[in-house]
Amino acid sequence: MTVTLADVAARAQVSPATVSRVLNGNYPVAASTRERVLRAVDELDYVLNGPASALAAATSDLVGILVNDIADPFFGIMASAIQTEIGGPGGRAGGERLAVVCNTGGSPERELTYLTLLQRQRAAAVVLTGGAVEDEPHAAAVAAKLRKLSEAGTKVVLCGRPPAPDTGAIALTFENRGGGKELTEHLIGLGHRRLGYIAGPEERTTTRHRLEGHRAALAAHGIEEDPRWTVHGRYDRRSGYEATLELLRRDPTLTAVVAANDSVALGACAAMRESGLRIPEDVSVAGFDDLPFSIDAVPALTTVRLPLAEAGARAGRIAMGREEAPPGGIATIRGELMVRGSTGAPRG
Amino acid sequence: MTVTLADVAARAQVSPATVSRVLNGNYPVAASTRERVLRAVDELDYVLNGPASALAAATSDLVGILVNDIADPFFGIMASAIQTEIGGPGGRAGGERLAVVCNTGGSPERELTYLTLLQRQRAAAVVLTGGAVEDEPHAAAVAAKLRKLSEAGTKVVLCGRPPAPDTGAIALTFENRGGGKELTEHLIGLGHRRLGYIAGPEERTTTRHRLEGHRAALAAHGIEEDPRWTVHGRYDRRSGYEATLELLRRDPTLTAVVAANDSVALGACAAMRESGLRIPEDVSVAGFDDLPFSIDAVPALTTVRLPLAEAGARAGRIAMGREEAPPGGIATIRGELMVRGSTGAPRG
DNA sequence: GGCGTGACAGCAAGCGCTTTCTATCCAACA
DNA sequence: TGTTGGATAGAAAGCGCTTGCTGTCACGCC
């Protein structure tokens, strides 16, 4: 029914071994033989059996990319860049690899299960993007899994995620703390003293680091923070909208709001507008990430640009062994403050 | 080095066959035995070898999802919904499947290569999302590939893509033509007679269908279209921005612009604003898809809502055989006109 | 003329799992 | 007590490929 290597071999009048070697091309095969084999492959419309070949060779060409939310361009941009470098079809790289992205939905259980599934498939490499969950048992479980993967020969790269010590994983980490600090300092520099902060989900590293940066800036300028000025939510627009209304309820005198990311900031802008506040005249709003739509907002969003595509590309190259890992297996990637129309000096 | 089924069997004092049966759970195994095996699995930290099991069982738990652009929420939303239903980890479904999304970047070659890769892996199912390319040789090649996949037992589902006759593929198609017509009729109803159209890439089915709907509406109302009123571009914001400037240059008297999708519409809005035109007072702008950000635009975008998540979920269920295929293997999914602030009556 | 040598090609042993068929055991039944 | 059959467990034959090792052959050199 299905065509196998043996069928091709028979047709080309060679042994299966020869066909395999032609297909893998790492063994001398006479040109005439090769051609005969290739013709047979073509005529029979032969397709290699992946599992069988993975089993025999004890390696596979599968590369996994884990993302928290596939519908969020933050991850989409990274995934796309990684995939290009991995050399999925048409990618820059040579061999054809099946670069697949797995959507964890931010759930640690799913993340773990996907890692197991990839381990099961003997994936050639795994790239984990985005912040990690800080819940101890899970963090430990993930670390253990990563170590196992590394030991089994799977290259593990973290992209935009804090290092995982002793796991053999290479980490490209975003400088969220520094970026957050710089952003808030910009606002302070404009004269703001009453700043709200819409944070992401509590237990995520990204959330914590950005918030820490914000607080560091406040502290550095002797601004005492009112606990009411921080609200936690999800990394989406809806959450930003609701959190802003809450913030406004708690303290209507805020002159600026810093959001956990651009989507949240957009939601914040919407809430402000509906509350009759002009941006930036009445209140300033700032985001984080600088996703493509941020420049389109009205007014355009002040934010911290993260080089997502570059980071992803680098992660992909490292995963493929086409670029050396950074010294110590850790690289820190800085963001860049983009000052635009959504922030200005406070009233008065 | 790596733990195999045999190791587990030895430890549990049973035969490999029994371990396999415990793990697959489709054969009677005494409770006590099962428990012993499970304990051994746990103690040895055993992970099934995917390729080996796929080879022996001649099936795999891999499911492929092809998208044109992973960084575009249009695809992200569908992919996410599909993946949930496929029952990737944590999904609604039972067995653990590796639902993977493959980014074709809109390139037909890549699409083909990914299909081959998936075929090679003996994927359990494949879902193709988004419009197809109309280039004849490629369309034929893709159709042939889909037929092969179907024949090999891979379930093929098209989500938001026109039917592929005689390939065995189930199609859930968006009613792009009807949606486009309705949208333009809304504009005509408001009094517009001079409408620009920013279309997507020439060779895509989605592009053609939406444009046809637009033209059908014009024709139905006796409006003769000026060829200068249509510009082709990509499905992104940048393209919308540039196309709008071009449109304005060609005919500054346009009172409305219909965009191929929401991203394009956003770019159009930006271009309008920079050209000193108010929306909708001076010019109306409409999009398509109703992505989450569309409601956030200022003014909010009039657009056609496509039930992306629902369609994706349904495609996923059909791919898993958990929902019956529509009669004839084809279902048409209608969009819903969402009238919002970006469209209004023309001046005067 | 014998033989080392290079260049290919083939043999055959797995890779780790699934599954059919067979063996075993014990309870129940006649 | 002999027999039948249900419930489990095991033996073993692959699944389709890769690859180390073993030929085989033609050349050219001493």
Image (spheres, coloured by chain):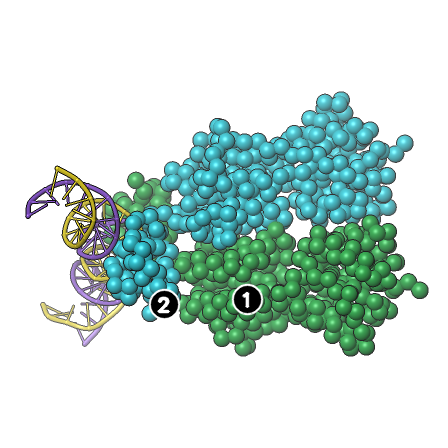
Chain colours: A green, B cyan, C yellow, D purple
Can residue A307 be seen at all in this image of the molecule?
no
* Residue sitting nearer the eye, B343 or A233: A233
| Residue at figure coordinates x 26%, y 52% from the top left | A16
Percent coordinates x, y for residue B20 in the rendering: 31, 55
Disc 2 versus disc 1: nearer the observer: 2
Kindly identify which residue carries mark 2. Answer: B43
Looking at the image, residue B322 sits to the left or right of residue A68; the answer is left
Whether pointer 2 and pointer 1 mark residues with C-beta atoms closer than 8 Å, the reply is no
- SS state under label 1: strand
* Residue sitting nearer the eye, A41 or B303: B303
| Mark 1 neighbour class, 10 Å CA radius: few under 14, some 14 to 19, many 20 or more | many
User: For the view shown, which residue lies furthest in the right direction?
Assistant: A348
A33 relative to A129, above or below? above
* Residue sitting nearer the eye, B328 or A250: A250
| Mark 2 neighbour class, 10 Å CA radius: few under 14, some 14 to 19, many 20 or more | few
Q: Quadrant of the N terminus of chain B?
A: bottom left
| Quarter of the image where one finds residue B12 | bottom left
Can residue B29 be seen at all in this image of the molecule?
yes
Kindly identify which residue carries mark 1. Answer: A158
